[in-house]
Image (cartoon, grey):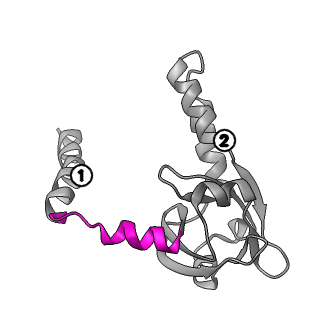
Amino acid sequence: MTKHLLGEFECKVDSKGRFLLPSGLKKQLGESDQERFVVNRGLENNLTLYPESEWLQISREVNALNLYNKKNREFARYFFRGATELKLDSAGRLLLPRQLIEYGGIGREIVLFAYGQRIEIWDKESYEKMMANEPDDFSSLAEEVMGKINQESADDKK
């Protein structure tokens, strides 16, 4: 299983849609997760790259949803739409599918943003615009999001 990934990595995409997986990122992956991946549409106009073991875990969770529920079926369809298995080539590159390149607006430069067990793939310009749009009060956002975790932990101890 892959440990928690971390970091931002800038990469170049060639005319065929291939990019070199940075060694600093590859070193963070478990040995069994350094060759095989699944790429999928992200939740915002980006792509998400999962080590194969993480994809299998997430797929089990999605497949465990009650598919008799319409919202669950819709979610599963959109979640799996475009999902593609990738394998590193002999030069250490991954080939992004054309339809996902178009979905993510991927140009010649990308940013791989690694966190948790996933790697978001962003067009570099789109990533920079998003990150420049930092909330005016990051402290309030942190309190709103992370404060709930601390409260839930306190509630669990009761």
- Taking the image as shown, residue 46 lies to the left or right of residue 100, namely left
| The C terminus, quarter of image | top left
Give the amino acid at mark 2: Arg
x, y percentage for residue 46? 53, 58
Location of residue 91 by image quarter: bottom right
Q: Secondary structure at mark 2?
A: loop
Any mark on residue 81, and which? 2
Which residue does the image show at 74% across and 59% down from the upper left?
Answer: 98
x, y percentage for residue 2? 59, 64
Q: Nearer the viewer, residue 34 or 49?
A: 49
Residue range corresponding to the magenta coloring: 123-138
Q: Nearer the viewer, residue 30 or 100?
A: 100
- Taking the image as shown, residue 21 lies to the left or right of residue 124, namely right
Q: Nearer the viewer, residue 7 or 158?
A: 7
Q: Secondary structure at mark 1?
A: helix
Location of residue 25 by image quarter: bottom right
Query: From the viewer's perspective, is residue 74 above or below residue 88?
Result: above
x, y percentage for residue 142? 21, 59
x, y percentage for residue 17? 74, 70
User: Nearer the N terminus, badge 1 or badge 2?
Assistant: 2
Which residue does the image show at 54% across and 32% down from the upper left?
Answer: 75
Give the amino acid at mark 1: Val
Q: Residue beneath label 1, please?
A: 145
